[in-house]
Every structure is written in structure tokens, then in C-alpha cells.
Image: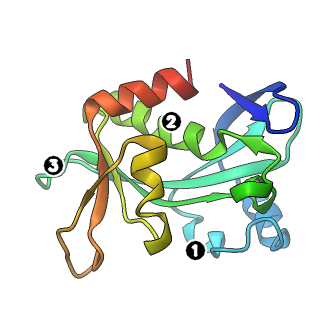
């Protein structure tokens, strides 16, 4: 998978790996780059990091939740955060979030869920996820998802895997 330099268009090889205890300590110390969530609360969960193959610096984080059976059969992106230097209009590298989301899609296929994933977006991202990644907003409200959720189907999961991982 590759990230792209915004100013130069240069391609950089990246990898997604399971977070280690050492990684959680590094993220906790780096409150400037990862300032939105307390990732230590996710130490015992399925958390992945994205980094360049040439550098140990963590560029993005994602926590996945497996939902086998339960009438769901999908993977939930419980939490996703991109380092502050790669967010919005001033970002240096593009495709960090896209690679993480595509990785979740690939995991969904591996687990027999046909690529189905879902997430509960922050209010200001509800319009971003459909435009950028093909998610569909589902306004069904539940106690743990009062604003509804967004889902990605098989076709769009395959498209993201091809775009970001292949």
C-alpha cells in the first residue's frame, strides 16, 4: 500500500500492523499528533497502526470490533484517528484513512463477512464518508448509536481494497 505526498506526489510504501504495548506508550506521550482519543482505553482490543516501511512513526490508528452472528456479520471500525499532520487541508500525506478503512474491508472478507463494515461517524464526518469512501448513512438510532451509523457494502469494499491496498 502506498501513501502519497501532497506537495510532491511522491509515493511512500506503508504497512499496517498490530499495536504493541510499546506503541501504546508512544501514542500516549504524543498527545499533539493523536489528540482526539485516549488510545490507552483500547489496549486490550484489536488495534492497528499504519506507518511507513522506512520509519517507525505511527501515522494512523484504528480499532476494530468483530460482530459475528448477532444478525450483523460485519466488522465495526470502533475508532479511527489520523495523526494531526495528515488531517484536512494542511495534510502532508494522503490516503492514511483510506488505507486503514480498506484494511478493515479486507479483514471483513477474511472473516467471512463479504467486506461489510460499519462505523458510527462524528457528526461533522457524516457527509465526508460517503463522498470519500462510498459509505451509506443508515439513520437507524439505537442506545449506543444515537445518530445512526454508516455501512459499506461488498462492492464498495472491493473498490477500496483495489484503490488503497493493491
Instruction: Look at discs 1 and 2 and give the one toward the viewer.
Output: 2
Say if 42 sits above or below 158 in the image: below
Q: Residue at x 31, y 34 (%)?
A: 115
Q: Which of marks 2 and 1 precedes in the sequence? A: 1
Please determine whether, in this image, residue 40 is positioned above or below residue 15.
Answer: below
Tell whether 100 sits left or right of 126: right
* Residue, disc 1: 41
**Residue that carries the numbered disc 2 in the rendered image:** 103
Farthest residue, direction top: 166
Q: Identify which residue, 139 or 28, lies in the foreground.
A: 139
Give whichever of 48, 130 is nearer the camera. Answer: 130
Q: Which mark is residue 69?
A: 3
Image position, residue 4 (x, y; %): 76, 32
- Number of numbered callouts drawn: 3
Q: What residue sits 76% from the left and 52% below the top?
A: 86
User: Mark 2 or 3 closer to N-term?
Assistant: 3
Q: Residue furthest left?
A: 71
- Lower position in the chain sequence, tag 1 or tag 3: 1
The residue carrying pointer 3 sits among few (fewer than 14), some (14 to 19) or many (20 or more) residues within 10 Å by Cα, namely few
- Disc 1 on helix, strand or loop? helix
**Residue 87 shows in this picture:** no
| Residue visible at 50% across and 43% down in the picture | 101
Residue 33 rendering spot, x and y as whole percentages: 80, 65
Quadrant hosting residue 116: top left
Q: Which of the image's four quarters has the N terminus?
A: top right
Query: In the drawing, does residue 164 fall left or right of residue 161?
Result: right
42 sits left or right of 149 in the view:
right
Q: Residue at x 72, y 62 (%)?
A: 24
Whether residue 118 is visible here, answered yes or no, is yes
Q: Quadrant of the C terminus?
A: top right
Q: Is residue 34 above or below residue 65?
A: below
- Which is more foreground, mark 2 or mark 3? 2
Amino acid at each position: 500500500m502506498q501513501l502519497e505526498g501532497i506537495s510532491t506526489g511522491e509515493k511512500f510504501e506503508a504497512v499496517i500492523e498490530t499495536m504493541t504495548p510499546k506503541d501504546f506508550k508512544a501514542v500516549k506521550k504524543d498527545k499533539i499528533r493523536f489528540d482526539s482519543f485516549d488510545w490507552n482505553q483500547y489496549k486490550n482490543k484489536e488495534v492497528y497502526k499504519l506507518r511507513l516501511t522506512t520509519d517507525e512513526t505511527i501515522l494512523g490508528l484504528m480499532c476494530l470490533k468483530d460482530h459475528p452472528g448477532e444478525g450483523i456479520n460485519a466488522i465495526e471500525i470502533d475508532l479511527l484517528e489520523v495523526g494531526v499532520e495528515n488531517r484536512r487541508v494542511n495534510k502532508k500525506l494522503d490516503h492514511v484513512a483510506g488505507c486503514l478503512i480498506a484494511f478493515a474491508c479486507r479483514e471483513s472478507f477474511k472473516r467471512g463477512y463479504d467486506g461489510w463494515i460499519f462505523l458510527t461517524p462524528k457528526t461533522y464526518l457524516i457527509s465526508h464518508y460517503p463522498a470519500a469512501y462510498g459509505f451509506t448513512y443508515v439513520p437507524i438510532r439505537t442506545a449506543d448509536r444515537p445518530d445512526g451509523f454508516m455501512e459499506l457494502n461488498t462492492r464498495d469494499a472491493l473498490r477500496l481494497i483495489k484503490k488503497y491496498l493493491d
